[in-house]
Image (tube, rainbow, N blue to C red):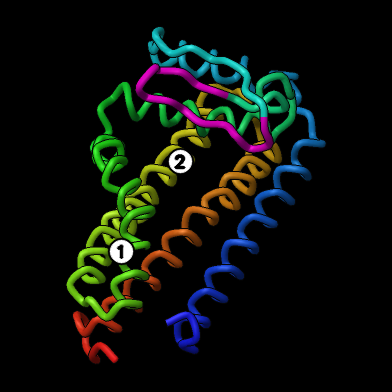
Amino acid sequence: MFYDPAYIAIMIVGLVLSLGASLWTKSAVRKWSKVRTLRGLTGARVAEAILRAESIHDVRIEPIDGFLSDHYDPRSKTLRLSTNIYSGDSVAAAGIAAHEVGHAIQHARGYSMMKLRQAMVPVANVGTHLGLWLVIIGMFIGFSGLATLGVFLFAGFVLFTVVTLPVEFDASIRARRTLAKMGLLHGEELVGVSRVLTAAAATYLAAAITAVLQLLYWLMRLGLLGGRDD
């Protein structure tokens, strides 16, 4: 299958989408990291202010190494912000911190899509690792049953990437709305936040599109979706 023009085309599309989204995100973050917020609030202080306003008092905020390694861990209720976001007082830092707080708010409010996403983590891990290998091995040795099992396992990972989209989009919406409502950012600052978060959302969209295209390809190769296994 690795020499199939259709498969190669899918891989190229996925690579272009991923690289494009990544470059877009890095460009937006670097641009708005150079623009300080008028109030001089760091990402950590923005996060603290929003959590207090939302009456969430059991979430820890701590710095973490790495570029754009920011994330919220619902298991330990910890908001981890990369050092340049944690201590930075830029528009990008405020927007990214607010986005991650959005996930903490989702968790505290029992947002259904976040619950579903967390429940699917084990399935996604199996699908993206074991599923792919079963497909490759099954197709290589001509054992369609094994390949079919691998495709269905991989489908779990694909569903995970799709479910991730509304979770990420909702966190960004919450971030922009909260920053404006609390008066933490104004005017052009909010425009910058929107551009940073929109670019970041594109990375998740690119991953989902690539995963769906791969799944459709394998389903067709195995004759499970039109066509036939050749």
The three-letter amino acid code for the residue at tag 2 is Ile
Vertical relation: 230 (above or below) 218: below
Q: Give the labeled residue for mark 1.
A: 134
Residue at image location 31% in from the left, 41% down from the top: 121
Vertical relation: 218 (above or below) 153: below
Label 2 neighbour load within 10 Å: few <14, some 14-19, many 20+: some
Residue 173 disc label: 2
Which sits in the foreground, 102 or 157?
157
Residue at the far front in the pictured view = 141
Label 1 neighbour load within 10 Å: few <14, some 14-19, many 20+: many
Rendered image quadrant of residue 209: bottom left
Q: Which residues are magenta?
A: 66-80
Q: Position of residue 145 (x, y in %)?
A: 17, 72
Vertical relation: 225 (above or below) 51: below
Q: Main secondary structure of the magenta part?
A: loop
Vertical relation: 204 (above or below) 110: below
Residue at image location 62% in from the left, 19% down from the top: 63
The three-letter amino acid code for the residue at tag 1 is Leu
Rendered image quadrant of residue 109: top left
Residue at the far right in the pictured view = 34
Quadrant occupied by the C terminus = bottom left
Residue at image location 39% in from the left, 17% down from the top: 76
Q: Position of residue 159 (x, y in %)?
A: 29, 56
In this rendering, position of residue 90 left or right of residue 63: right
SS at mark 2 in the image: helix
